[in-house]
Image (cartoon, helix red, strand yellow):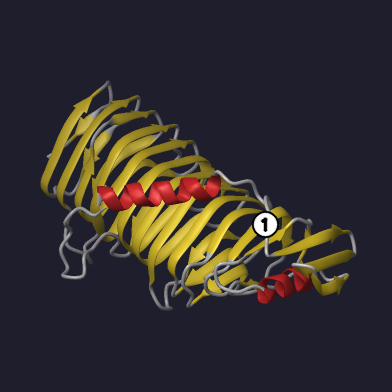
Amino acid sequence: MRSFVLAAVLAIASVANAQCGSGTPDARVTGSGSSFTATRGSSTVYSGSDYRAAIQAAVDSIGAGQRVSVIASGSIGANTITIGSGKIFEGCGTINVGNRSGRGAIESVNTNDVSIPYLTMTGNPYFGLRFYGTRNLNLGRITMNLSGGLGIRFDRDNPANYNVRMDVITVSGAGSHAVETWNIDGLNINQVIARNVGESGLLLQATRNAWVGLVDGQNVGTGTGYATFRMANNNGQNPNGNYNTNIYVDRVVSRGGGRGIFCVSQSGAVVITQVDLSGNGNNSILIENCYNVSIRGGRVNGGGEVRVAARSEFPNNRDVWITLQVDNTSVRESPCGQNINWTLSGNGGRNLC
């Protein structure tokens, strides 16, 4: 696992170190206002007022292993840009997007070896980026300053994804989740930074063999049961049904909002090395019907209680290890789980089995 993680980090770093639009891209989109030009080499493939059409023409003009750099800023409206296998897409300008029901403003589906090293997006999309059926997808430095919608989405009811890498994903203003995954085997994320988003910062579902460096949320999921970091719907469960550890999270930071960390609906197989949670409006940590969960250190200060709970429709919690400093809020285990292990410090009240 660690060698896989190291390879992913090095690959991300090599992409992120280049400058957006540098060198000689195979295709470029330039212009502003109502005049845009897409070129491939010395050939013009689009000239006109439609920003989306210019981008799509540039993308369609290149082949596998080639790069398109969108230098111009503009708006694509309630439309979709599609990226095919092997293509490298750089959004160097700011791409403003609209809401196309059920679709992404930018999509890549049933593809191999797609890379988006840079992207800056604004607007109110249904999904900012939408994926399924991908293999070796590489997302670099993605910044979304949104006024609604969901940031990055991997679909639930479509083919699975393999070997997905992300460097730094920064999402503000989403009405839903910053990053939501379904059906990924092999996921490596350097950082997810979520600010003022309506639901979760990072939501992992039916995902396994994952490493995450940092999830950092401020005002995430305020007034909801969502969390800065949430795992749900059998996340971490291995194909044979067991919950041997395969999800590794280095650090979760959460300020205000709803929950800090939430594991639910038969998820687990996770080690979270350190937490720094303060002032969460709902549970600071809630573990509910999860298996093989280890939180190995850090601090909870104020906010909602740290809770191990269970619903009757799923098997009870089992094999949980929590080492924490808990101050100015309480810790509760109810109902009692199986093999729940606490190592606590701090002034927080305790109601444990």
Q: Is residue 45 above or below residue 210?
A: below
Give the image location of residue 164, x and y in percent. 42, 61
Q: Is residue 68 above or below residue 253?
A: below
Residue displayed at 74% across by 67% down: 41
Residue that sits furthest to the top in the current view: 347
Q: How many marks?
A: 1
**Which structural element holds mark 1?**
strand
Task: Identify which residue, 278 or 223, lies in the foreground.
Answer: 278
144 lies left or right of 153: right
Instruction: Give the x, y percent position of residue 59.
Output: 67, 71
Q: Decide: is 25 above or below 168.
A: below
**Amino acid type at mark 1:** Gly
The answer to whether 202 appears left or right of 140 in the picture is left
Residue 288 seen anywhere in this rendered image of the structure? yes
Find residue 254 and report its image quarter.
Answer: top left
Q: Residue shown at 48%/45% (left/top)?
A: 13
Observer-nearest residue: 289 or 38?
38
What residue sits right under mark 1 in the picture? 91
Can the viewer see residue 223 in this picture?
Answer: no
Instruction: Name the quadrant of the C terminus.
Output: top left
> Relative to the observer, which residue lies in front, 256 or 181?
181
Q: Position of residue 265 (x, y in %)?
A: 29, 61
Please report the residue visible at 40 percent of the width from the left and 47 percent of the height from the top.
9
Q: Position of residue 124 (x, y in %)?
A: 68, 60
Q: Residues within 10 Å of mark 1 (few under 14, many from 20)?
A: many
